[in-house]
Image (cartoon, rainbow, N blue to C red):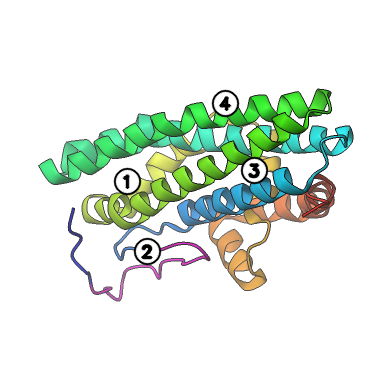
């Protein structure tokens, strides 16, 4: 699919660009929340791959922390992909041309390729949380690299082509409705508390302030309440990295 370069109009938002992100197509929809999530997915898989290489297989406590941290990552990723599959892709399917629909079909197919990798990694973390098994640790390290590479490909494809379709066919009002109905719906206050701390971790201070200001005061409060605890747990889980 060929994406035409678009000159930003004065009324369009300035799109967020974070480390590892190959593109930020111009258009009327402010995609800051999507890009923050993608940044966190990339960040996590880099950290997990490093932790699997460095964490001794005999350190049960750290593996239990890593297993719990993997559950958070995979739960958020599954919710994110479910929102795209149930809301975003179907809406774009109604508005895109044949070439665009091929891109959207590829997005769904790539989600299906990632899910088995996530389950396989979860099994590896669960095993190492219970027993000292260096072979399991080595196998998990290989699976995590494969998952990191597969998800990196998917995110790159999405950011360069699928989000270009978002900007071509959706309005900011469409996007707000999608976020409310498919990306934020079904999340408890406790889950939102964990999600905000997870998503905002590791983002440059000035970017985080701007993003939190856009998402609203409740998210600012959740970040302030949870940031120190999340950072403490993060240091404990990834202590060998």
Please report whichever mark, 2 or 4, sits nearer to the chain's N-terminal start. 2
Which type of secondary structure does the marked residue at label 4 adopt? helix
Question: Residue 114 placed where, x, y %?
Answer: 46, 34
Foreground: disc 2 or disc 3: 2
Above or below, 28 relative to 165:
below
Question: Residue 232 placed where, x, y %?
Answer: 84, 51
The span from disc 2 to disc 4 (Cα, nearest Å) is 29 Å
Which type of secondary structure does the marked residue at label 1 adopt? helix
Q: Main secondary structure of the magenta part?
A: loop
Q: Residue at left 39%, top 54%? A: 156
The span from disc 1 to disc 4 (Cα, nearest Å) is 33 Å
The one nearer the camera, 55 or 108, is 55
Q: Which residue is mark 1?
A: 174
Q: Which residue is mark 2?
A: 23
Please give the range of residues in magenta: 7-24
The span from disc 1 to disc 2 (Cα, nearest Å) is 21 Å
């Amino acid at each position: 699919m060929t994406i035409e370069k678009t000159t930003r109009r004065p009324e369009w938002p300035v799109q967020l660009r974070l480390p590892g992100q190959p593109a930020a197509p111009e258009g009327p929809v402010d995609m800051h929340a999507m890009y923050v999530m993608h940044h966190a997915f990339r960040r996590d898989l880099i950290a997990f791959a490093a932790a699997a290489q460095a964490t001794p297989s005999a350190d049960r406590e750290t593996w239990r922390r890593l297993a719990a941290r993997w559950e958070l990552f995979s739960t958020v990723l599954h919710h994110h992909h479910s929102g795209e599959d149930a809301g975003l892709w179907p809406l774009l399917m109604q508005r895109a041309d044949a070439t665009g629909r091929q891109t959207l079909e590829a997005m769904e197919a790539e989600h299906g390729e990632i899910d088995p990798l996530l389950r396989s990694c979860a099994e590896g973390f669960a095993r190492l949380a219970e027993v000292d098994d260096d072979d399991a640790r080595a196998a998990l390290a290989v699976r995590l690299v494969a998952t990191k590479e597969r998800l990196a490909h998917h995110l790159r494809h999405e950011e360069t082509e699928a989000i270009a379709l978002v900007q071509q066919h959706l309005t900011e009002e469409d996007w707000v409705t999608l976020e409310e109905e498919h990306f934020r719906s079904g999340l408890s206050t406790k889950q939102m508390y964990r999600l905000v701390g997870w998503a905002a971790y590791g983002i440059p201070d000035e970017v985080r302030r701007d993003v939190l200001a856009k998402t609203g005061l409740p998210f600012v409060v959740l970040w302030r309440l949870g940031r120190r605890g999340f950072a403490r747990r993060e240091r404990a889980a990834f202590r060998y990295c």
